[in-house]
């Protein structure tokens, strides 16, 4: 029952408390008799009225905010299990080098990037990671399939993890692509469990922002988002860009430690050399990329073609044959010919002798010269690019839609290899299919990209941006598809 209280006051100690008769109160009315209570109320009243600050006022504690995940300042910081230690490292300056005391506290032996690049050898020991989708933030499928393929390329992933564990120096240096790929690999959790047996489900898909930013720093694909690009072209930019970063590091290191080569030595090194070729005939060899620097990228993907020019009589240097060594990171195979229906046919086409029309000898006489390319060095990871897009005078660029058969295991035919002692080790080598990148659509300027990737242990997965499915067997990878065609094939040497 509510009623109006009569106007009255209550005196407690020296404080006279007035009761407003216009205030509705509950009867019976109760006024606390505790002097301390009213003194506290009076102080609060005076503080609010005059704006004075009372030292005795206790502020409510502010709930701590969730810290924003910062980029690591060093590769070693990725290894530290303690979140507090990682947060402390992230707050350091971007160019701060982790001290030797911190490295020792980690219990690991760290070295320089130069030492790792100089001494690294191809390894196939990368741990299996749990599959994770990549968000397509606007026609980015061409990038997603390449990143997934490289993640499951065991030597490449093993190289990144080895650098992460062995090297201590700051991020934001002169190797942005290499660092971006290290951070990308760090986003995946080591897990060999088959996809269909995962009880807790997959981690949420994410956007590889670090790779985007690194490519923008390199002035690559400035219109990266929202514009369709070619997957093979992107892979070329990415892998070659990492190689160039490594070359820059090694050259700077050698410039500080190795005396400059004299002009005479340089001229002598570029003069070429003679080798014994077929039928015991002399062949003048020349390396057209003698300045190439050996890096982990060239150890994983780098091969070499031997291109031989044969002219009736003698060539300009007095020998009947002259060969150039031409390095490659992947083989581009022409599949447009009607005679090409398998990978073997495409490789036969690659090494077939080519007649050079209009060739003139040093005497000024026309001659029928032939040029032939064969494999001189084969990398541990052989990447085959099927040239699906060809230019026609009347139609412009069009896509070759026909199915090209590719095997689960590739053996190198003797006709594909150079006739030299260096290729003997490849004659019995076999390469297993570990990845396929597909192109969907009819035009070079559009379409969609997906990929089938083999995890360590033999499980095949299909990646379509954020969607991941398990395939029953490699047979599902090898068969012809109505909605897509194989564009890039990854073959890894059998150990």
Image (cartoon, rainbow, N blue to C red):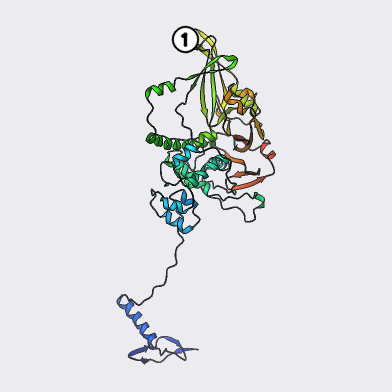
Q: Nearer the viewer, residue 214 or 156?
A: 156
Q: Quadrant of residue 142?
A: top right
Q: Quadrant of residue 426?
A: top right
Residue 104 at x, y = what percent? 45, 52
Q: Nearer the viewer, residue 98 or 32?
A: 98
Q: Which residue is mark 1?
A: 362
Could you tell me if residue 55 is visible in this image? yes
Say left or right for 434 vs 311: right
**Relative to residue 81, is residue 434 depicted above or below?**
above
Say left or right for 40 vs 121: left
**Relative to residue 302, is residue 13 depicted above or below?**
below
Local SS, label 1 = loop
Q: Nearer the viewer, residue 168 or 65?
A: 168
**Relative to residue 213, is residue 39 depicted above or below?**
below
Residue 424 at x, y = what percent? 61, 26
- Residue depicted at 60% across the width and 30% down the height: 400
Residue 456 at x, y = what percent? 62, 44
| Numbered marks: total | 1
Could you tell me if residue 335 is visible in this image? no
- Residue depicted at 35% across the width and 77% down the height: 56
Q: Quadrant of residue 158?
A: top right
Crowd class of label 1 (few under 14; some 14 to 19; many from 20; radius 10 Å): few
Residue 132 at x, y = what percent? 58, 49
Q: Nearer the viewer, residue 205 or 83?
A: 83
**Relative to residue 160, is residue 32 depicted above or below?**
below
Q: Quadrant of the C terminus?
A: top right
Say left or right for 229 vs 32: right
């Amino acid at each position: 029952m509510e009623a109006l209280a009569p106007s009255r006051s209550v005196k407690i100690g020296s404080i006279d408390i007035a009761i407003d008769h216009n205030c509705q109160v509950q009867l019976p009315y109760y006024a606390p008799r505790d002097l301390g209570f009213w003194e506290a109320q009076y102080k609060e009243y005076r503080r609010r009225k005059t704006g004075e600050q009372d030292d005795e006022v206790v502020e409510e504690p502010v709930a701590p905010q969730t810290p924003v995940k910062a980029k690591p300042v060093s590769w070693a910081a990725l290894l530290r299990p303690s979140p507090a230690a990682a947060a402390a490292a992230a707050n350091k300056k971007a160019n701060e080098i982790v001290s030797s005391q911190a490295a020792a506290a980690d219990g690991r032996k760290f070295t320089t990037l130069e030492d790792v690049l100089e001494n690294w050898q191809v390894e196939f020991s990368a741990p299996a990671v749990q599959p994770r989708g990549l968000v397509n933030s606007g026609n980015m499928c061409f990038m997603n399939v390449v990143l997934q393929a490289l993640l499951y390329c065991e030597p490449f992933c093993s190289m990144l993890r080895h650098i992460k564990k062995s090297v201590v120096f700051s991020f934001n240096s002169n190797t942005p692509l290499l660092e971006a790929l290290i951070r990308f690999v760090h986003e995946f959790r080591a897990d060999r469990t088959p996809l269909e047996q995962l009880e807790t489900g997959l981690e949420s898909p994410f956007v590889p922002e670090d790779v985007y930013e690194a490519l923008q720093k390199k002035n690559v694909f400035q219109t990266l988002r929202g514009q369709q690009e070619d997957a093979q072209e992107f892979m070329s930019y990415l892998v070659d860009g990492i190689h160039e970063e490594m070359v820059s590091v090694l050259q700077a290191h050698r410039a500080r430690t190795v005396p400059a080569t004299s002009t005479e030595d340089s001229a002598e090194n570029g003069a070429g050399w003679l080798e014994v070729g077929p039928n015991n005939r002399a062949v003048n060899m020349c390396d057209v990329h003698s300045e190439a620097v050996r890096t982990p990228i060239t150890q994983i993907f780098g091969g070499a073609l031997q291109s031989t020019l044969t002219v009736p009589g003698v060539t300009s240097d007095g020998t009947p044959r002259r060969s150039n060594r031409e390095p490659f990171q992947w083989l581009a195979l022409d599949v447009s010919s009607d005679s090409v229906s398998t990978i073997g046919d495409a490789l036969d086409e690659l090494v077939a002798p080519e007649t050079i029309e209009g060739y003139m000898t040093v005497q000024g006489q026309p001659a029928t010269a032939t040029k032939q390319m064969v494999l001189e060095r084969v990398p541990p990871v052989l990447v085959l690019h099927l040239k699906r897009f060809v230019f026609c005078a009347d139609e412009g660029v069009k896509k070759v839609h026909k199915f090209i058969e590719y095997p689960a295991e590739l053996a190198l035919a003797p006709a594909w290899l150079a006739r030299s002692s260096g290729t003997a080790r490849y004659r019995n080598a076999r390469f297993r299919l570990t990845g396929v990148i597909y192109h969907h659509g009819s035009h070079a300027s559009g379409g969609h990209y997906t990929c089938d990737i083999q995890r360590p242990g033999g499980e095949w997965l299909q990646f379509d941006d954020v969607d991941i499915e398990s395939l029953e067997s490699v047979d599902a990878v090898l068969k012809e598809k109505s909605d897509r065609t194989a564009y890039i094939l990854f073959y890894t040497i059998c150990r």
